[in-house]
Amino acid sequence: MLTNRSAPHARIAPVLTVADVRAAVAWYCDVLGFVEHVRIGDHHRAQLGLPDGPAAEMVVAEVRPGRRLPQDERSHQLMLKVDDVTAVVTAIVARGGEMVEPPHDWEYGERQSTVNDPFGHQWVLNQTLADVAPEDWGGESVTPRPPTG
């Protein structure tokens, strides 16, 4: 697949609409570890990614016709894999975010916590604790994922 330095490299990149693009970019970089790849105007939009490659990229964009801020009733969440859920939740709360669900260990091998960022978006933070087959907890393997690394 052809890549372009002016566009996200990830195959899917959510667009998060915010009231203050620069404040949101600073928060996502400082608290969640994203880096800013491309800035398009001072307050129009920015392309962010994780420093270890295009596995997760997103666009932070201004409010404009056809794009509104999130409402109380959410239509989506963003899942982000982190090394230490508890540490990230602590940083989020310290920087104006809200813990919705505290860290919890699940039978499928993940520690998760749900948080709201100060810009109206909800994140589910995942920390992998173990490699667990879906069949071990009642799930079903359908199409195996390709090997990583």
Image (cartoon, rainbow, N blue to C red):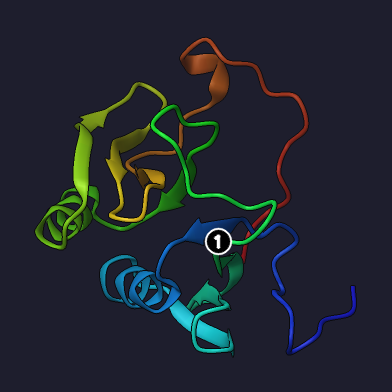
Q: Where residue 76 appears, x then y in whole percent?
A: 53, 36
- Amino acid type of the residue tagged 1 in the rendering: Val
Q: Determine which residue is flagged by label 1.
A: 63
Q: Does 114 appear above or below 142?
A: below
On the picture, is 20 further left or further right than 64? Answer: left
Between 144 and 94, the one nearer to me in the picture: 94
Q: Where residue 59 appears, x then y in whole percent?
A: 59, 67
Between 142 and 75, the one nearer to me in the picture: 75
Between 22 and 30, the one nearer to me in the picture: 22
Q: Does 72 appear above or below 92?
A: above
Q: Where residue 110 appears, x then y in whole percent?
A: 36, 35
Q: Please, which residue is most extreme toward the right here?
A: 1
Q: Where residue 83 appears, x then y in whole percent?
A: 30, 58
Residue positioned 9% across, 59% down in the render: 94
On the picture, is 47 further left or further right than 105? Answer: right
Q: Quadrant of the N terminus?
A: bottom right
Residue positioned 27% across, 75% down in the render: 30
Question: Which of the 4 image quarters holds residue 25?
Answer: bottom left
Q: Does 4 appear above or below 93?
A: below
Q: Quadrant of the C terminus?
A: bottom right
Q: Please, which residue is most extreme toward the top here?
A: 138
